[in-house]
Amino acid sequence: MKNSSAALRIALISLPIFIGALDVTVVSAVLPQVIYDLEIPLQSGLDDAAWLVSGYLLSYSIAMTFMGRLSDWAGRRRTYLAALIIFALGSYLVAVADQWLSRLAWQVVYLLTQTRVDPAQLSLNVMIAARMIQAFGGGAMVPVGMALAGDLYPPEKVARPLGLIAAVDTAGWVVGHLYGGVLTRFFDWRVIFWLNLPVCALAFGLIWIALKPVDRHGGGRGDLHTPPEKLNPGVSKGAARGFRMDWLGAFMISACLAFFNLGLGSSPDLTASLSDIQRQPWLERALPFLALALLSLALFIWRQSRHPFPLVPLTLFRQQNFSPALAANLMIGFSLFTAIAGVPVFVNTLAAKTLQQGAWDSGWLLSALTVPMAAASLPGGWLAAKLGYRFPSLLGLLLAVVGFSQMLTWQIATPYALMVPHLALAGIGFGLTMAPAAAAVLNASPPGERGAASALVIVFRLVGMTAGVSTLASYGVYRADALSLQWLSGSAQAVDLIHMGMQIALQVLHETFGIAALICGLAFFPIMLLQNIELKKG
């Protein structure tokens, strides 16, 4: 296929991928306004409202684990367009979640249970469900798009379009907060989701036409670059005849990610006393979910070792640099999203006077993190090609640790101008680290499995982000409750509740930034395991 027509098709499928990734972080800027509009108390609703972010990340990650393999059977165009429809439907449902959809859900719940549920909480739950539908479509487009790159380009030229799709996906969630902040300043937050619909409609028509030749030439439908017996050496050639989708494996990995997220997001009862909180530590609440996640993961690995068409070829993990680079991507995702989620909380809680101003300020302030990060990814890749993976990655992690350490000095009266260099330092650090960590995974993979490897890079980073949102939301609620009770029980005089709340929020944010710095420091260990080899051609 001509390079120009292949490049045009890659550009077309990248547009919806960018929109889907944009919505990963767009809610971080508008979350306070959503909580206000739904009339949810900030303290009691923050942990549940965090699922608008973590639920999206979870569903986005789940779709990425198996929808690429599904397109091998169902066809690339059919699977991609189905994912686009799901994303558009989810966007519409989010836009109307607190309107007729919530009223319908309330009536259904009442008819089934004869109980009157809290309308605000129900609206939030409906919106979370709609966000997860939207995310499934958005996440599914990424691995199918990567598989399309493998259909359109020969193995020796596929690395560049794979890198482009991965970069587009990353760019979306990098600028999502700014996009949300700017739109919320001038329009209702629902406009963000309404705007997805005409873009999806236009993309659907263009992609329907553009991908017809791919269907005719065998895009998907078992057209694998790598024979099944090489995907899973333990499977005989006879057993590998005729593609079979591993639905049980898809269920197992979905259950693993869901239980993992629920375990990390376990939070205390907000009406509990300090002694109750101390008697019910986080691990006690989280352990059952984490145990189920571990069991699901073990079953998934067992299943993948025996299925002729595994969702995740386990042979990849035997490749040099593959596992430590994925571990580093996991930690990078956790730390990065701490800043992306923490900065809007800082601005809206401690600095901005109105929610609209907070969304605007958060969007622009986070640009001090994300713009340097995007800019630093280019020299990060160049340094990796010249010096190997370790040097730029370690330098980047060191800068990120220093940046987070400086964020520990933020006070209520700290002006934005002093925050910018701290965020920029962390952003440069992440940018220098992300490109080498992703390249190490891609370069460790056989040409026929670079699509699966590229998807795994994003999945591990997203799992890290999901873990970051769930853990820090739960930790923040737990610490805020504990500190509030300590503050009130230790004071014999009247307490200024506003001052107390701001000081507690500041301390919790400092602690979360400290956790992010610690995780960045721990990422030194997998990075040190990377071998300083030159990037392979092709």
Image (tube, grey):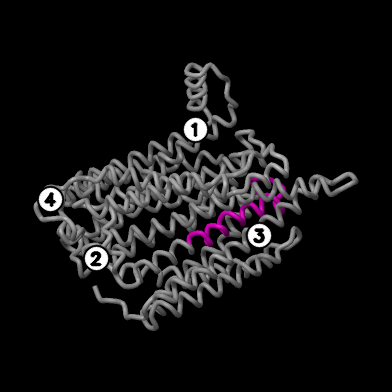
Earlier-in-chain disc, 2 versus 4: 2
Residue that numbered label 2 is attached to: 158
Callout count:
4
Residue 290 percent across, percent down from the top left = 47, 49
- Mark 2 residue type: Val
Earlier-in-chain disc, 1 versus 3: 1
Q: Which mark is residue 511?
A: 3
| Residue 345 within the segment the image draws in magenta | yes
In the image, which is nearer the foreground, mark 2 or mark 1?
1
Quadrant in which the N terminus is drawn:
bottom left
Determine contact: label 2, label 3, CB under 8 Å.
no
| Residue toward you, 42 or 154 | 42
Earlier-in-chain disc, 2 versus 3: 2
Residue that numbered label 4 is attached to: 239
Determine whether 107 is above or below 175 in the image.
Answer: above
Residue 331 percent across, percent down from the top left = 48, 63
Q: Which residues are magenta?
A: 333-357
Who's the residue at 24% across and 44% down the image?
208
Residue that numbered label 1 is attached to: 126
In the image, which is nearer the foreground, mark 2 or mark 3?
3
In the image, which is nearer the foreground, mark 1 or mark 3?
3
SS at mark 3? helix
